[in-house]
Image: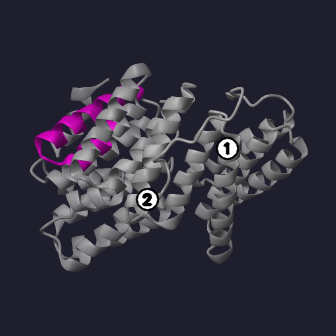
Amino acid sequence: MNALKSLPCLILTLGLTHGLLASCQGSGGTRDLVVPEGTAATNALLKRADEEFTAKSYQDALETYTELHSAARSKGLKKVAAEAAAQIATCYAVMGQSGEGDPWLEKAEADASEQDVGAYTRILLAQGVRSWRAFEVDRARGMFIYLYNYSLNQNRTPRAVQAAQMAALASRGQEQLDWMMRSIEGARTTGDPALEAPLWTEYGVMFDQRERFDEALDAFANARRLTAQASLPRLVRERTDWQYAHGLRMVGRFDDARNLLEETNAIVHSNYIERPSPQSAELLGRVLAEIGEVDAAEGRFDRAKERMLAAREKLLEAGSVQGAQIFAKTLEKRIENLGAPAPIRKIPPKQRPKKAGNGRG
């Protein structure tokens, strides 16, 4: 597939940031990419694999895409096989094992053509993510922008939304915010809150990193509102609540943050007990660490340390899920420096009034 193999040379010329592939969201992406030439069985496998990928269960997704590839090849469904192989390459790239994915990317290129829009866009995504994970920032950005324009021309809005979000992650300054808003606006046209909600979370993280905390909180509130409207797993809803509570803390609304965090902690802890998993352990760690930060902000340093140590334990248990190990190391330094102000904090002279319309309803 010469056109695809030469594409990076034609486009040419990140530090990794929070929320990798956060907008690879399910219903929109799955609806966009189901292959008509597939059988009911292979389409069901593709849907399941995409849902696992969306949930960031990359190892599970990898196994399902591999099963799909085998089934598609045995039935002579080359387009479906190409989609599966491209996604296998993307899974490996996301997990930091791009070399393992290279043979799969070659298989995808061999089985697809530019006329196979679903497979073609997945191959472009795999190539872009591979470059992004290799810190080839400009190259990755160019590939994601190409994918965005190509997807728009092919009326593949969900894939264009995803490409714009990835272009944002590979951009800097105001351009990063512009690309993320472009992604949000595209998602809004689909009328799918499950596609739009996580983009608002990512947008809020970008403002949070810039210490623009009021704008971050507004973005997190939008994510929370849309998440409540969507049919999403319980952990996704609670993750959105944790992020919104973080936003409340950063604008100094400590009482509101604590109330929401304690409520979220009870739900997440119950889920962890009932269905222990790396994902539930990671989220529990995040929530406990955030409660610890509220304690620290209010001068309760012994309590903060207790919460943060418990958080660190859960993050280590989670392993590599959602950057848990990286956050655990950051938390170690935070525990050592308890008693000093948090690295980023904004404390107004008094609690701000609650804003209407931010609840889940």
Tell me what residue is drawn at x 56 percent, y 46 percent.
244
Q: Secondary structure at mark 2?
A: helix
**Image height of 149 relative to 222, above or below:** above
Depth check, front residue: 201 or 151: 201
Instruction: Check the image and report above or below for 243 versus 192.
Output: above
Q: Give the residue at x 27% y 50%.
A: 122
Q: Residues within 10 Å of mark 1 (few under 14, many from 20)?
A: some
Give the image location of residue 319, x and y in percent.
65, 56
Q: Nearer the viewer, mark 1 or mark 2?
A: 2
Q: Residue furthest top?
A: 173
Q: Which mark is residue 228?
A: 2
> Looking at the image, do the residues carrying marks 1 and 2 touch, with CB atoms under 8 Å apart?
no
Residue 289's x, y, as percent?
72, 48
Give the numbered dot on residue 327.
1
Residue 176 — which label? none
- 359 lies left or right of 309: left
Residue 110 rendering spot, x and y as whole percentages? 20, 53
Depth check, front residue: 170 or 124: 170
> Which secondary structure lies at badge 1?
helix
Left or right of 30 on screen, residue 355 = right
Real-space CA distance between mark 1 and mark 2, rounded to the nearest whole angstrom: 27 Å
Magenta segment: 137-164
- Is residue 128 visible in the rendered image? The answer is yes
Q: Main secondary structure of the magenta part?
A: helix
**Amino acid tagged 1:** Phe
Magenta region includes residue 57: no
For marks 1 and 2, the one nearer the N-term is: 2
Figure quadrant of residue 165: top left
